[in-house]
Structures are given as structure tokens and as C-alpha cells.
Image (cartoon, rainbow, N blue to C red):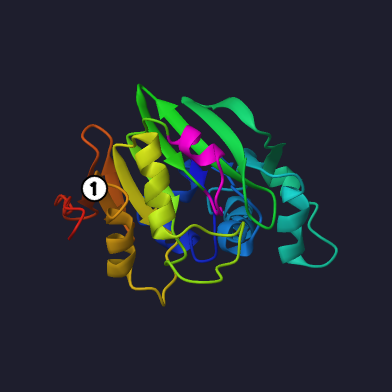
């Protein structure tokens, strides 16, 4: 399963998984940086050397099929429904394959979901894109890994209901008693070391910054560098 399929995602994804082995896609919301590569993936499934692939489920907010179809053109793309079965997300609980998934609306300019995934007693929580949202600590409660967006650094006049600061993400992680906090969705012009410092002021547990190719071993919640197998630095002040 793939969670979110933003612009540029389909290339790096192929380093880790055969595209035809993906059995479901889950979209937090329909902003382009979280969904646009789903159309490229539809082409891969339709024109694979192995032949057209059977449809797989895509779970997303209402209007997902129409939104992705507009990438093809203003008339949309009716072929998408031959490549995917579109399932509309709603807050609550659902089962996707072996995963128990809890969903809640979060604060963002379009309908957006945060997720809690549980399998074999292990849990990962993911905020999607969100501003301050009281549902987030509940989704992350006791999670082994809490993957939280942290697009903003602390500062004046930050727009509400859009993104979290690194410190706000850490406050939620602390309230949730999460085992490990991983900050993601950092803006390229923000210094990740400053984000780490701001987060460490509100969360004393294991703290990390998401990196390309990062692998999380839920057996011990240690981050491993893909390709090297080396454990990441677990110091919250590093």
C-alpha cells in the first residue's frame, strides 16, 4: 500500500517496490503534492509490458476520481475507473488488507484526513497536512511512530488551519505519548536543524527528521538508512 502519491513520488518509489506489486493507494487529500503522481501510476498499470493490470482500490476524499482525471485534461479521463476502484474516505475505522485504519478530519484548506495504522500490535500515525487539530493527539496516542508534518517554524502571523510548526507537532507527540516523532513535509527553505531544536523543546522522546529512503523498523522503532542498514542518530539534540 502507498500512502499519498505526490509529485515526483513514482520515480523514487521504484527503488523499493515493483509498481505492479502495490495493492492499494490511500490519499490524505487532493492537493497536487499529495496525489498528482497517481495519474502517472495509472498509465504504468494500463501500459505495463505485462499487460493491463486489474484495478486496485484507491481510498481518497470525495471527488478523487474527478480530480485525478483533470490531470489528463479538462474533460477528465473515464479510463481511470478501469484502472482503479475509488473508495470515498470518511472519519472512523476501516480495514484495508491486514491494516486497521482509524481516520479523522484535520484542518487544511481542502478536506484532509489524518491516519492511524495498526498491525500486529504496532502502530504508525500520520497527520497528512494539518494545522492545529485536536484529533491529532488521539490518532497518535501511544503510537510506536508518529509521522507529523512540520512545514512551519515558529514565527509571527502564521496562517491558521494550514500547517504545524515543529514545536506544535512535538507538543502533540508529547500529549500522545508517542514512542518516536518523525518530522516531515519540512519546507526546503527552512533549516531542519532549527526544526529539530524547536521540536526538542516540547518532546523529550526519540526525534528525527524524515529523509529520502528512510526505513523504520517497528520491532524497535529505530530508523535505518536504506541501503546501509545503519541505525540513525536517536539523540533529540543531534
Task: Classify the position of the C terminus by image quarter.
Answer: bottom left
> Tag 1: Cα neighbours inside 10 Å, few (<14), some, or many (≥20)?
many
Residues in magenta, as a range: 128-140
15 is higher (above) or lower (below) than 24: below
Residue ID at (60%, 55%): 38
Please tell me which residue is depicted at 74% across the width and 49% down the height of the picture: 65
Residue 197 located left or right of residue 32: left
Q: Residue at x 23, y 32 (%)?
A: 219
Q: Residue at x 35, y 57 (%)?
A: 15
Does residue 139 appear anywhere in the picture? Answer: yes
Q: Main secondary structure of the magenta part?
A: loop
Verify whether residue 194 appears in magenta: no
Q: Nearer the viewer, residue 207 or 224?
A: 207
The front one of 78 and 180 is 180
Q: Which residue is mark 1?
A: 223
SS of the residue under disc 1: strand
Q: Position of residue 21 (x, y in %)?
A: 46, 42
Would residue 14 be seen by someone viewing this image from the given angle? no
As displayed, is residue 42 above or below residue 139?
below
Q: On the picture, is 163 further left or further right than 205?
A: right
Amino acid at each position: 500500500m502507498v500512502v499519498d502519491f505526490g509529485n515526483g513520488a513514482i520515480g523514487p518509489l521504484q527503488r523499493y517496490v515493483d509498481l505492479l506489486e502495490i495493492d492499494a493507494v490511500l490519499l490524505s487529500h487532493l492537493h497536487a503534492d499529495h496525489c498528482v503522481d497517481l495519474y502517472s501510476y495509472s498509465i504504468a498499470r494500463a501500459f505495463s509490458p505485462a499487460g493491463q493490470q486489474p484495478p486496485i482500490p484507491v481510498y481518497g476524499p470525495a471527488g478523487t476520481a474527478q480530480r485525478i482525471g483533470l490531470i489528463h485534461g479538462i474533460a477528465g479521463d473515464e479510463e481511470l475507473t478501469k484502472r482503479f476502484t475509488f473508495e470515498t474516505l470518511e472519519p472512523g475505522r476501516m480495514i484495508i488488507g491486514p491494516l486497521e485504519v482509524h481516520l479523522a478530519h484535520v484542518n487544511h484548506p481542502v478536506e484532509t484526513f489524518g491516519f492511524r495504522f495498526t498491525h500486529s500490535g504496532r502502530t504508525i500515525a500520520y497527520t497528512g497536512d494539518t494545522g492545529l487539530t485536536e484529533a491529532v493527539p488521539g490518532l497518535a496516542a501511544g503510537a510506536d511512530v508518529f509521522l507529523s508534518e512540520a512545514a512551519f517554524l515558529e514565527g509571527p502571523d502564521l496562517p491558521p488551519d494550514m500547517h504545524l510548526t515543529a514545536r506544535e507537532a512535538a507538543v502533540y507527540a508529547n500529549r500522545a505519548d508517542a514512542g518516536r516523532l518523525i518530522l516531515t513535509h519540512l519546507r526546503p527553505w527552512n533549516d531542519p536543524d532549527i526544526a529539530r531544536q524547536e521540536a526538542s523543546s516540547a518532546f523529550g522522546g526519540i526525534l528525527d527528521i524524515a529523509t529520502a529512503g528512510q526505513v523504520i523498523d517497528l520491532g524497535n522503532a529505530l530508523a535505518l538508512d536504506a541501503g546501509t542498514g545503519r541505525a540513525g542518530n536517536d539523540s533529540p539534540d543531534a
